[in-house]
Image: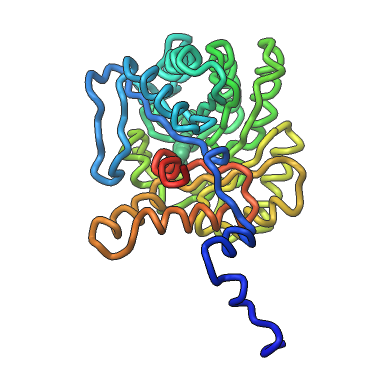
Amino acid sequence: MFPERRLRRLRKSEGMRRLVRETRVTVDDLVCPVFVGEGLDVPKTVGSMSGIRRIPPEMVAEEISGIWQMGIPAVMLFGIPESKDVDGSSSYDEEGVVQNAIRNARRAAPEMAIMADVCMCQYTSTGHCGIVKGGVVDNDSTILSLGKIAASYARAGVDVVSPSAMMDGQVAAIRSSLDEAGFPDVAIMSHAAKHHSSMYSPFRDVADCLPQFGDRRGYQMPYTNPREAMMEVESDISEGADIVMIKPAMAYLDLVAEAKRNFGVPVAAYSVSGEYAMVHAAHSMGWLDGPGTTLEILSSIKRAGADIIVTYSAKDAAGLLS
Ligand code: PBG
Ligand code: ZN
């Protein structure tokens, strides 16, 4: 007790503070999202996500080698196709935007962990994450399509598929599709507990996947239900998920910590577009220091127990941390 115990003794200098640091964010923790727009000639920016662009397919190789050279070990590819239909059939086209991007990324950085989002909302004319039948997203036909998408990504050379549709049984369907196609070594990082969040709006601008009617409450998790979130994590692991993800990150760190405590697999946290946009908007107003806030948020995600952080700040953080 005070006056014998004085915790300030270990905060006296930078050297002391470095010695007793308990949490370290490193570039090794980061996954950098990359958006590829089919048919684009020049990069397309959106107002809500400063510094984030949709890039043309021709720029994928350059973008990926740049990210690899910054020391970032992994990317998460998202595609924006030229054509959409009710069934989202361009999502499993062997020559689709993501499939081609995977091949180019693989050539540009052979040792990089190439991850790709597996969902249908950029590909369906409804903007929903699956096939709409009678006004609702049909679970069991959707998971078959998700399996087809994953297999086509695997044929293109992906390392990790990341289903984000929040369909029941999506991990099992993808695992069996991958195994049947001869890809037992392609891993699954499931969006196990992906919540219905107001913080996805900027992403929908970049990825062009706004639902054309209704919302995603019928499949994404309510943020009020932590027990249910752990059931989602548990069932994804039992269906074969290699890594489980909590999404969003910043307002969901209790769930990151709980998933880490309860299960043995690596836990990922997805710091979503709205989290990024809030920091950048406040920084641009001069209301806070953006880089400092970014490092603070990333550290808190790590401190909560995340092994992997998907973040739009990956490149900025790589610079700040080096
Ligand atoms: C859609 C998808 C979304 C995000 C990732 N995949 C948006 C949504 O569910 O509407 C959001 C990511 C972000 O906001 O950064 N499958
Ligand atoms: Zn989706």
- 178 displayed left or right of 67: right
The answer to whether one can see residue 134 in this image is: no
| Foreground pick, 120 / 237 | 237
Residue drawn where x is 28% and y is 65% of the image: 287
Q: In the rendered image of this protein, does residue 115 appear above or below residue 154?
A: below
Residue drawn where x is 57% and y is 31% of the image: 162
Question: Which image quadrant is residue 149 in?
Answer: top right
Q: In the rendered image of this protein, does residue 275 appear above or below residue 140?
A: below
Q: In the rendered image of this protein, does residue 3 appear above or below residue 312?
A: below
The image's colouring method is rainbow
The answer to whether one can see residue 226 in this image is: yes
Q: In the rendered image of this protein, does residue 167 appear above or below residue 176?
A: below
Residue drawn where x is 38% and y is 39% of the image: 211
Query: In the rendered image, which quarter contains the N terminus?
Result: bottom right
- 199 displayed left or right of 139: left
Image spot of residue 139 (x, y percent): 58, 33
Image spot of residue 227 (x, y percent): 69, 57
Image spot of residue 268 (x, y percent): 60, 43
Query: Among all residues in the image, which is located at the extreme bottom?
Result: 3
Residue drawn where x is 49% and y is 30% of the image: 75
Disc tally is 0
Image spot of residue 6 (x, y percent): 64, 81
